[in-house]
Image (cartoon, rainbow, N blue to C red):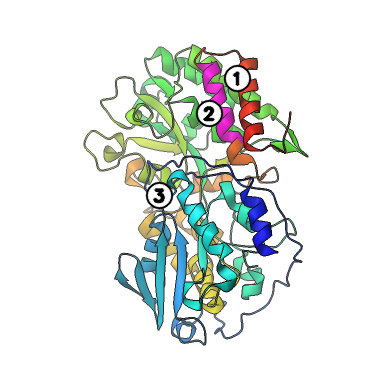
Amino acid sequence: MKKRLLALSMAMIMVAGSLSACNKETETTSTSTGSTTETAATTDTTATGTTDNTATGTTDTTAVAASDEGSVLNIYVWNEEFKSRLEDHYPGYEKVDATTGKIGDVTVNFIITPTDDNAYQNNLDEALLKQANAAADDKVDIFLIEADYALKYVDTPYTMSVADLGISASELADQYKYTQDVMTDANGVLKGVSWQGCPAGLIYNRAIATEVLGTDDPAEVQKAVADWATFNETAVKVADAGYLMTATVNDSYRVYSNNVTSKWVDGTTINIDPNLVNWVNDSKAMVDAGQTTTAALWSDDWSKGFFEDAAQPVFCYFGPAWFFDFCMHGGEDTAIATNGGWAITEGPQGFFWGGTWIAAADGTDNPTLVADIMRTMTADDAVMKEIAEVDGDFVNNRSVVDELAADASFGDSILGGQNYLSVLASGADSIDLSNLSAYDQGCNEEFQGAMKNYFDGNATYDEALEQFYKAVEEKYPELSH
């Protein structure tokens, strides 16, 4: 039955190209629909065989590693981000080589498959289909997923309930709600956790802000981008000074799409939310006025604005903490980031971008160790603070974020030493995922692709819309418009 469930869901997967320009963030495919009939488990339980240290959210690592469980912990990932976090911050972890480590007597085996051509999900799906009959040392224990395709796994029996692992709701109470909403199935059961939040803001060029707006102070710049009407007014001033407002129309797309009031699909009917129409109208006006371009995200044309010698400098980009630390070329010659030339403010609307979630595979023979890794890496205050300070992540812990946001010594050199946490935290609790659907990634990518023809003057809006409908209906034959 499980095989049939996943096989049915595989038939509806959208295969999309990955976006791998940044070391820390990639975008992959869309998801299928599906639901399970499991019921929500009681949340306040304790995992059998663990040593309860709920004050810190951790267990005794030696006891966990020596428990009567499997001798190999298999973790499926698409890059080295989680591997590095585990190596650097999980107590007692010993690195053996590039893909192997030890936790007590347990060998930790990272199966790393890049996202190119959907390879990561294909490899993971194949392993999950074999999970029931796999030898103990070959079973998937942990796998990592992104929001864009989370429902593909969350709404199937292939992911374990966090409560069934013995992790209580009270242990996770300090996490941002939206990070749990991503991993909550149709029955309200939490199926995974994350150590990071990715609320995002508007990252702007300090020099351009000073020239055009007379200040580079985040609070003052926010007044010039506080909503889309004022943002568009500022775009005129920026363009008049010879600069691009944004590198591409695609920079702002997630801000609009994160703030829709309806889902992409109503029953089986494709639905275009009014906020996406707003993006089309605003973007077309900006392109026609020379205030932005239609370049692809991660392309060379898009990234030119990160450098001081850009022919047409860019005023702002949109992104979370991983964006300015891993995508803006800090440390490189002529990069604006190298000299602290950027700053961040809230922007027109709150939104999030990215994130990585830890899921436990049903059938794991290491449930105690898996639970301890989840607790330690996502709910231990000390570990969360360490990750924030060492790696620069916006950690999924309100108390730690609030503490560091008030610390004048905490900041990012790319932002000229600005403490960005309070800016990002201001939008974290406003993120609403009630309109998340299994079709999001496929519809979003096809919509942007079709509208490019309109922005470039190669199609009317209606023609671009028909192109979008055709592409989505070919991808998802059960849908219509």
Q: Is residue 25 left or right of residue 100?
A: right
Q: Of the residues shown, which amino acid type is indicated by label 2?
A: Lys
Q: Which residue matches tag 2?
A: 223
Q: Is residue 17 above or below residue 296?
A: below
Name which of mark 3 and mark 2 comes first in the sequence: 3
Task: Report the span colored magenta.
Answer: 443-455
Q: Is residue 206 above or below residue 438?
A: above
Q: Is residue 208 above or below residue 458?
A: below
Towards the viewer: 304 or 477: 477
- Helix, strand or loop under label 1: helix
Name which of mark 2 and mark 1 comes first in the sequence: 2
Most frequent secondary structure within the magenta stretch: helix
Exactly how many numbered labels are in the figure?
Answer: 3
Q: Is residue 25 left or right of residue 278?
A: left
Cα separation, mark 1 vs mark 3, equals 33 Å
- For the question of whether residue 40 can be seen, the reply is yes
* Residue 5: percent from left, percent from top: 68, 58
Q: Quadrant of residue 291?
A: top left
Mark 2, residues whose alpha carbon is within 10 Å: few (<14), some, or many (≥20)?
some
Q: Which residue matches tag 3?
A: 24
Cα separation, mark 2 vs mark 1, equals 34 Å
Q: Of the residues shown, which amino acid type is indicated by label 1?
A: Ala
Q: Which residue matches tag 1?
A: 464
Q: Is residue 438 above or below residue 243?
A: below
Cα separation, mark 3 vs mark 2, equals 31 Å
Outermost residue to the left: 333
Q: Which residue is pictured at 29% across the width and 42% down the height?
A: 330
Name which of mark 1 and mark 3 comes first in the sequence: 3
Q: Of the residues shown, which amino acid type is indicated by label 3?
A: Lys
